[in-house]
Amino acid sequence: MSNFYKDNSDILFHMKNMDLSWVVDLKEDGFADKGKYSYAPEDYDDAIDNYGRVLEIVGEIAGEFVAPRSSAVDEESAQYKDGEVIYAKGTAEAIDRINKADLAGFTVPRKYDGINMPITIYSAAIEMISRADASFMNLFGLQGIADTITKFASEDQKRRYLPRFSSGEVMGSMALTEPDAGSDLQAVMLKATEGKDGKWHLNGVKRFITNGCAKISLVMARSEEGTKGGRGISLFIYERDENMKIRRIEHKLGIKGSPTCELQFNNAEAELLGKRKMGLIKYTMYLMNGARIAISAQAVGIAEAAYREADSYSRQRVQFKKAIRDFSAVYEMLTDMKVNIEAGRTLLYETSRIVDIKEGLEDKIDDHPESAGDLKGEFKRYSKYASLFTPIVKGYTCEMANKVCYDAIQIHAGVGFTCEFNVERHYRDVRITNIYEGTTQLQVVAAIGGVIGGVVFERLGEYEKNYDFQPVSDLFAIIREFRTQLESAVSHVKDKGDSNYQEFHAKRLVDMATDTILSYLLCIDAIKSERKKKVAQLFISKAKHRIESDLDYVLSNDDCYIELHKDIIDSEEIV
């Protein structure tokens, strides 16, 4: 039997070695559910055991049920007929299997019939589902809709909607993008109008909506007449009725089992979620940040699938009387793929853990105001970490996964370009990951403030304080120099005081920060494992050259390069 949890030694390594004590304590609120629900854990060890059992179930579904149907799902695709979306047969079967396993309310609190899993465990589950079928993850991973309702809705709304998510009766979608509002969500123009009876109605078009055929949608709309910016936008819970038409679904390069819809709202009745005018600046940002972690997990899962295909093929393919895996040109590619996937996974789990702590602290402050004073400082600190790590993990994992899938096809050579091997599908599926939920370029914009503002150095300082790097002192000396080089680059840009120069070098600064963070995390892993020490050595050996190159460019002070870029793209050769 194929189990995508039990066959992945790296996920098992992290589950064994991650310190989830704070996460568990916050998520379980001191084990307040003990005795109320038969499946609620009694203590920390029980919670960790529960997490492992849930992931084992997800791994079995992914390996035994979802993966064998993935090629047929890709070929059949989601279909559009007579104004309705029809899932591919394998997709519909996978949805049913997830529902029967009681996994539809993965992160929903138990009081609303969910299983109350933390984001860290959800990330591991999403990775395994994505390894099986990236397009199915876009349905399984939309449980963030329920999270947003849990976080911001009224108690009445929670009781009416969340149990329906948990049972699998309904699925969700996030209806944000419009034809003229993609990355710039402040440009949203779909109108929300409040009637004299207090009911809201939606009018306008949404485009590129993943699973837009879902029963429940969170719709971002302009609720304040005459406004243009983000302050005029609210978020609404919409339950599908005859007043929303699916105009079409997109014909896409990849993730074909996931329907991407264009929606027309015609005076469709909806409910306000939370407060007016907070739709973009608070609620949608929460929703999107959760989605960015989910896409990061999706990227790691696709990369894992592509690597395994490439490694298997390289063992079987014989050229010049030996397996191509034995040629240095190939085994270096494979090694880089594996090292970078493991780097992405450790960053994914670290980011998920940070977000779990941040969310748990916020919930505890809300639920136990008497202890708020002691927690606010920690909440503020972890909010900063989450704001930095979330765009960094999406930027790194998605670019990494695209490179892994590219190299997987290269290792397959000619047959990799055909539809007979799975790497062709992985290559198509992965391409969207560094585009949706904010392109890599937008992740740089989101992360640069935390790099320039010193949040990254605060977190690195905590790693140095909390871990004994003596067992890997040789590697620690190198990564401590990485930190010094990053500090030099940041100080130089800040001292220069030129916003154009900072913007031009923002990606280099974020790349340096990413390589430095990853090197610290891999060294922390290396403390616990001799094999991980080898992984860290290889990653750091190549990160060293990247960081030195980026630092050299940042310190060059060649302002003319900025203008040269503009000159090249704004002018043509005169012949």
Image (tube, rainbow, N blue to C red):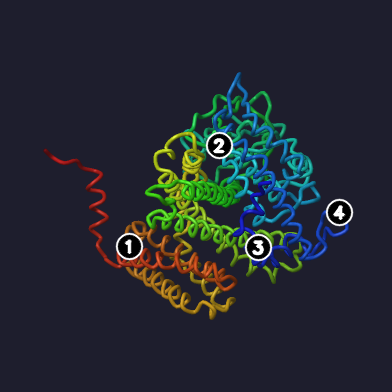
Residue 498 - label: 1
Residue at image mark 3:
357
Alpha carbons under labels 2 and 3: distance apart:
38 Å
| Dot 4 amino acid type | Ser
- Please provide percent x and percent y for residue 132: 60, 43
Q: Please identify, in this view, whether the residue under mark 2 or under mark 4 is nearer the observer.
A: 4
- Please provide percent x and percent y for residue 331: 43, 56
Alpha carbons under labels 4 and 1: distance apart:
60 Å
Q: Quadrant of residue 482?
A: bottom left
| Dot 1 amino acid type | Asp
Disc 1 + disc 2, Cβ < 8 Å: no
Sooner in the amino-acid sequence: mark 1 or mark 2: 2
Q: Secondary structure at mark 3?
A: helix
Alpha carbons under labels 2 and 4: distance apart:
50 Å
Alpha carbons under labels 1 and 2: distance apart:
38 Å
- Residue located at (11% from left, 38% from top): 575
| Dot 3 amino acid type | Ile
| Residue 355 can be seen, yes or no | yes
Residue at image mark 2:
225
Q: Secondary structure at mark 4?
A: loop
Alpha carbons under labels 3 and 1: distance apart:
36 Å
Give the farthest residue toward the top. Answer: 82
Give the farthest residue toward the bottom. Answer: 470
Disc 2 + disc 3, Cβ < 8 Å: no
Sooner in the amino-acid sequence: mark 4 or mark 1: 4
- Please provide percent x and percent y for residue 315: 48, 50
Disc 4 + disc 1, Cβ < 8 Å: no
Q: Callout 3 environment at 10 Å: few (<14), some (14 to 19), or many (20+)?
A: many
| Residue 281 can be seen, yes or no | no
Residue at image mark 4:
38
Q: Is residue 348 above or below residue 263?
A: below
- Please provide percent x and percent y for residue 122: 66, 52
